[in-house]
Amino acid sequence: MSMQVVTQLKQLDMELVTPDVGTIFWMLLMFILVLVILKKFAWKPILNALDNREKTIEESLRSADRAREEMEQLKADNEKIMAKARMKPGDFDYVIFHQPNGKFPFRVGAMLGFAKEQIEPGWLVSRLGNTYSGSSPLGLTATLDIAKRLLDFGFHAPTVYFPLVVPEALMIEPTETETVETLDRFASVMRKIAHEAESEPDMLKSAPHDTPVGRIDEARAARELVIAWPE
């Protein structure tokens, strides 16, 4: 390498280490300009975003604390109810919880002392989705079809479509006089209907089949109302 090239490289290094006044001026000016732009247009949104993120984290932590307190209260209330009834989780063959997702019933069931085997028979959310709807645990069928099908098994149809705040609601209200055997049979029938709704939906849509009078055209009955028996 020639002496001239070496000299030029040394001069370039010195310029980088000790820039001239003009370079320093323009760099300082650009830095100040960037700060002004950030302060005027970007600084406030950035601070607001950071503040909102911090508030969101705090609210999430508070929500988690509230949820934990509610679950602890639920567990305490359940223990009181079970103690008052002189029963314990082991006294039940199976139990059905609210199923907004697949994990909730198992998590709550474990907290209340129920085993996985007691929850699985009624765990349908994994196949049928959210069970807020009264008919969704029973497959792709309407509440009225379920009520009609119950007649074939000797059960009076329960109140349907009530309460109004729950779509396709099915209100089941057994009295205290019903025996355990009757309740078990009803549960078995409901499970059978659930399987029919998935495998043979037409069986429900044309029910009842074993009653003196079959499926009535309720829409026509409402339109052509007859309120007196013909002489």
Image: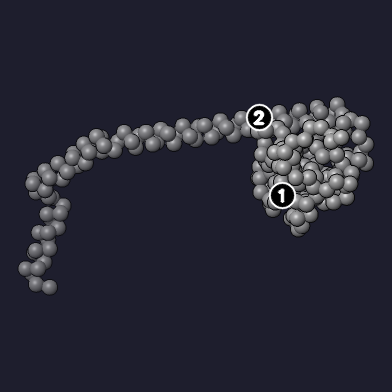
Side of 228 relative to 57 (left or right): right
Q: Nearer the viewer, residue 105 or 125?
A: 125
Circle 1 Cα neighbour tier, 10 Å, few/some/many (<14 / 14–19 / ≥20): many
User: Does residue 111 show up?
Assistant: no
- The residue at the far bottom in this view is 1
Position of residue 90 measured from the top left corner of the image (x, y, whole percent)? 86, 40
> From what the image shows, is residue 81 above or below residue 141?
above
Alpha-carbon distance for marks 2 and 1? 38 Å
Q: Earlier in the sequence, mark 2 or mark 1?
A: 2
Which residue is depicted at the point 82% across and 39% down?
Answer: 157
Which quarter of the picture shows residue 30?
A: top left
Element on which disc 1 rests: loop
Mark drawn on residue 69: 2
Which quarter of the picture shows residue 176?
A: top right
Q: Nearer the viewer, residue 180 or 154?
A: 154
Side of 167 relative to 207 (left or right): left
Which residue is depicted at the point 50% across and 32% down?
Answer: 58
In which quadrant will I find the N terminus? Answer: bottom left
Which residue is depicted at the point 72% across and 42% down?
Answer: 220
Which residue is depicted at the point 60% across and 31% down?
Answer: 65
Which residue is disc 1 drawn over? Answer: 141
Which of labels 2 and 1 is toward the front?
1
Amino acid at dot 2: Glu
Q: Nearer the viewer, residue 17 or 180?
A: 180
Amino acid at dot 1: Thr
Position of residue 130 measured from the top left corner of the image (x, y, whole percent)? 66, 45
Position of residue 214 measured from the top left corner of the image (x, y, whole percent)? 83, 48
Q: Nearer the viewer, residue 34 or 170?
A: 170
